[in-house]
Amino acid sequence: MHIRPPGRPRSQRSEEAVLSAALRLFGEKGYGGTTVEAIARAAGVGKQTIYRRWPGKAYLAADLYEAIVPRGEIEADTGSLQSDLEAMVTTLFQHYAQGPAGPLLSGLIAEGQGDLEAPETLRSAFFDSRSQTTRDLFQRAADRGELPGETDIGFLSDLLIGAIWMRLLVRHAPLDRDFARQLAAHFAALYLQEGEVR
Amino acid sequence: MHIRPPGRPRSQRSEEAVLSAALRLFGEKGYGGTTVEAIARAAGVGKQTIYRRWPGKAYLAADLYEAIVPRGEIEADTGSLQSDLEAMVTTLFQHYAQGPAGPLLSGLIAEGQGDLEAPETLRSAFFDSRSQTTRDLFQRAADRGELPGETDIGFLSDLLIGAIWMRLLVRHAPLDRDFARQLAAHFAALYLQEGEVR
Amino acid sequence: MHIRPPGRPRSQRSEEAVLSAALRLFGEKGYGGTTVEAIARAAGVGKQTIYRRWPGKAYLAADLYEAIVPRGEIEADTGSLQSDLEAMVTTLFQHYAQGPAGPLLSGLIAEGQGDLEAPETLRSAFFDSRSQTTRDLFQRAADRGELPGETDIGFLSDLLIGAIWMRLLVRHAPLDRDFARQLAAHFAALYLQEGEVR
Amino acid sequence: MHIRPPGRPRSQRSEEAVLSAALRLFGEKGYGGTTVEAIARAAGVGKQTIYRRWPGKAYLAADLYEAIVPRGEIEADTGSLQSDLEAMVTTLFQHYAQGPAGPLLSGLIAEGQGDLEAPETLRSAFFDSRSQTTRDLFQRAADRGELPGETDIGFLSDLLIGAIWMRLLVRHAPLDRDFARQLAAHFAALYLQEGEVR
DNA sequence: TCCTAACCGAGACGGTACGTCACGTCTTTTT
DNA sequence: AAAAAGACGTGACGTACCGTCTCGGTTAGGA
């Protein structure tokens, strides 16, 4: 049973206005160039209405990232590690190439730094759960025997995601289909290697 | 021949005072917890004296990082890829474990995000030149025949640095000797793998 | 009908805190020795709260001057020009002698100088309206026949106020009861003079 | 006998460059809008060269005022109080109307305010000596019998100068020939008045 | 129909840091 | 010893956002 709390319910219209205004602003001005104040103004909404829903800009950005790059969309289960990786990474790169997803993610990463007692919530609730998709992908490959049994799934996931973040953060090289193929080939070749070595 | 510019030369004492004050403050309060104003006060120096030398906190932090993690110190040329990698990464991790180098680098990465027209200078002058050490290391391995001829050095460098940054930024797993060994082993095994594949 | 503007209304407590802190500081440190920052600190108020109400220190000082030397208090209507003048000027001098009114006014005058496109608002809103009291006093005298009909009220007002400012600004001679009597006698004697002259 | 001090003598060229640059800048940007730094730059001179000669901007301005409105030029001795006054004030107004003399004087007055322990030197060295010309003028009239014997020369001088300053500082009315005539007529009529009254 | 509670837009609040400006002094080399 | 040049420490400026608070007004359920 679901009982409604007393008082005026939160306005769905306001929430949507905030999200779409934020989406636009993050796209136009980047993460750091967008202030909560500006989002509220653009959405025609009071600042409190934003802070009532999200603890701060970062959490709003995280929600937004989830919305425009949904976990389900990047999952891939084609039967082979290489094609799974290529599919997932390519989809991801398409988002980064066209929309505010790229600035959003890099801003989100940046937000976690700085103050020593960083927003731990953000880390566990966002990064851990997002990287789960990658770990699942590698785990399925391991289960299929495409990776040696003793493979450290977390290590591979860090390698993969790290490389992508590196280019996202430094922007010294493009996140394009070639890079996706390179990544897929790199990890797909691990079995033979490790198998031979031992 | 070196001719001195006219006017009073910049005080080396002030510069050193700023650097050592900044080093201490970054260590104590982290990157985001340190303000230019606080550095100036702690160094007994006018704010202008800082802004005259560095365009902002990030550039000061970059200089500081160079000073405490000098390129020369992390270079390794032992004759084999695996031991080179392990030596370099281990040295790096020692710096991150004990001093302000870790917060400094993560703050530096974070600073580059945000405003869309990010400080490009910082990127090219700092990140590109720092990663050169890694690329050189891989290149020497390739020259020795430890990597297939067609190997993309930049790609390997991004993988390596990306993985380290990933852990530095998210702090979900330690930057320890085990991780260093794992990284060294991963890249050292590439030749056999690639050799077989083709 | 008076409708209240939307949003949180300006805090009267803050405003009063600013005014009383400013009054104290202007008295203690003089006009030039008082900074907006110090006023904000002393009032326990954000700087923005001051800038939201007044465009700058000068406007705050003008409001303060109005408060401590209210127009109503210096008006005098005793029936004769000489006693009116003596009453008004004496009252004024008492304020200058004891409180921050003197430094406040001289600071205010000084502020208007300097940049060529001086704060015109300050001039018309403050000086013009303050000098109206003096012009009214002379005008009543003229209406009573104590001054020749063709007398230029503005000219007399400038002479009177100018002499007072002169001593206020240069501080070469006191603003005391003798000077007040001298001034009153000077202007009261004009009718006979002008009457004779023509 | 005159012995020259040791070392390089002060450059007259520099001094002239400073004066003419200052003259131009005060005219263009007003008193407050002109900084010592800007004067030095415009004169192609080091800041120290200025501070070596004048204790600050105000003293330089005072020298400049003396130079462009020389005491000798505004003195008048025509034989009658009214024409003396009219001549002196008219000459003065011509300077204020065309050059930087007006802004210079008002800036100079402003400078004396602010800090409670005002530059006393400036007051006595500049204002007292400038106003001497006016007092001399009135004294000659008194000696000629154009003013009652008991007349307070300083009081009249304050009235005259105050009225002029008033208009200079507030700029609510022009400093023109009409005003000059009005002033001259006002003071010239005093004898009859005072003579009758007593 | 009123009451209570939580929402709403708006914008003021106390803070903190920013990066700039001008001050008057100090430190170079050159004259 | 004065010159030009320009860096120095100081301290205030006015602006920008932060996240919270306080208005009048709105929108629901329960009395």
Image: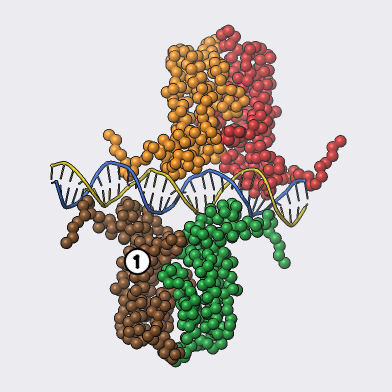
Chain colours: A brown, B green, C orange, D red, E yellow, F blue
**Which residue is at a point 51% across and 55% down the rendered structure image?**
B35
The residue at which mark 1 appears reads as A125
In the rendered image, the vertical position of residue D182 relative to residue C127, given as above or below: above
Q: Amino acid at mark 1?
A: Ala
**D173 or C118, which is in the foreground?**
C118
Residue D19: % across, % down: 68, 41
Q: Is residue B46 left or right of residue C14?
A: right
- The residue lying at 69 percent from left, 46 percent from top is D48
| Image quadrant assignment for residue D140 | top right
Give the camera-side residue of D121 and D183: D121
Task: Give the image location of residue A99, x and y in percent.
Answer: 36, 67
Give the SS element for disc 1. helix
Q: Is residue B121 above or below residue B43?
A: below
Residue C126 appears at what percent x and percent y?
A: 46, 31
In the rendered view, does B152 fall on the left or right side of D165? left
Question: Looking at the image, which is closer to me, A154 or B64?
Answer: A154
Image height check: is B106 above or below D158?
below
Residue that sits furthest to the right in the current view: D1
Does residue D37 appear in this view?
A: yes
Q: For this view, does C89 lie left or right of residue B10? A: left
Instruction: Please name whichever residue, B169 or C111, is drawn nearer the observer in this view of the structure.
Output: B169
Quadrant containing the C terminus of chain D in the rendered view: top right
Whether residue A36 sits left or right of residue B29 in the image: it is left
Above or below, A100 relative to D64: below
| Protein chain holding label 1 | A
* Residue D83 in sight here: no
Q: What residue is at 41 percent from the left and 37 percent from the top?
A: C15
Query: Label 1 neighbourhood size at 10 Å, few (<14), some (14-19), many (20+)?
Result: few
Q: Residue at x 62, y 46 (%)?
A: D38
- In which quadrant is the N terminus of chain D drawn? top right
Q: Quadrant of residue A31?
A: bottom left
